[in-house]
Amino acid sequence: MATAPAWSPDSRRLAYSLWLWHEKRSELCVVELATKEWKHVIYTDDQIYPVWSPSNKIMFSLYSGEAVPRLFQVDPDGQGLQECAGFEPGDSEPMWTSDGTKVVFGRDGGLVVRDEGGGQSRVISRRKAAAIQWAIAPDGQKVVYTCQGTDGAGFEVFVVDVNDGSTRQLVRNPIVHDHEVDSRYVSWSPWL
C-alpha cells in the first residue's frame, strides 16, 4: 500500500511511502518524474506519511517506541536523518505556504501556524474534535480542514483565516440511515 505522494519544491520529484506487509515496515521512496526512476530513501518500523519542506528535506512522523510521534527529516538521498528542530513531540503533518514563509501543522488536535523566520507559533483553530486533515490555500491566507462532527455526526469541513483565526463552516455532513459522504480529505483548486 502506497501513501499519497508529496511534491518536491522544484516539482521534479515525488516522495511516497510503501507499507511492506511481509516485512512489517515502511519504505520511503523518491521518484524522478523525468526518468520515472525511483530510489529507496530509508526503512522504518512506523508508517510514514511524507511531506516535502521548502528546504528540500522530506519530513515525517515517527513513534520510534515513544508514546507520541516526533517529526523527523531526511535528505532525498537518505542522508542526514534527524529530529526536526522547532517542533514539539506530537506535532504532525507540517504544510508550508507556497512562498515558504509560513508553516501550518497539527498540535494537540488543533492547527498551529508559525512564520518560518523564527516567529512564534500561534493556534489558529481548536475545536472539540481534532483536525484530521488540512490544506493551505494557494495564496497562503486560509486553511481548509476536516474534523469529526461534534454531535456524533459525520465529518465537518471548516475554513480558517491564517492571520486572524476567524473560522467558518463549509460542510456539515450528518450521518443519515448509517450513510455519510466521506469528507475527510480536502484540497484547494489552484484557481481559487
Image (cartoon, helix red, strand yellow):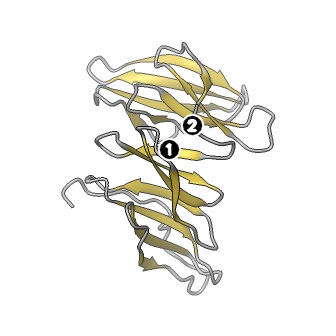
Q: Badge 1: how crowded within 10 Å, few (<14), some, or many (20+)?
A: many
Residue 164's x, y, as percent?
39, 67
Q: Secondary structure at mark 1?
A: strand
Residue 172's x, y, as percent?
48, 81
Q: Amino acid at mark 1?
A: Pro
Near-viewer residue (39 or 88): 88
What residue lies at 33% left-to-right and 31% top-to-bottom? 9
- Location of the N terminus by quadrant is top right
The residue indicated by pointer 1 is 94
What residue lies at 57% left-to-right and 31% top-to-bottom? 18
What residue lies at 29% left-to-right and 17% top-to-bottom? 35
Q: Residue furthest left?
A: 191
Q: Is residue 58 above or below residue 116?
A: above
The residue indicated by pointer 2 is 86
Can you tell which of label 2 and label 1 is closer to the viewer?
Answer: 2
Image quadrant in which you'd find residue 10: top left
Residue 44's x, y, as percent?
67, 26
What residue lies at 28% left-to-right and 30% top-to-bottom? 11
- Location of the C terminus by quadrant is bottom left
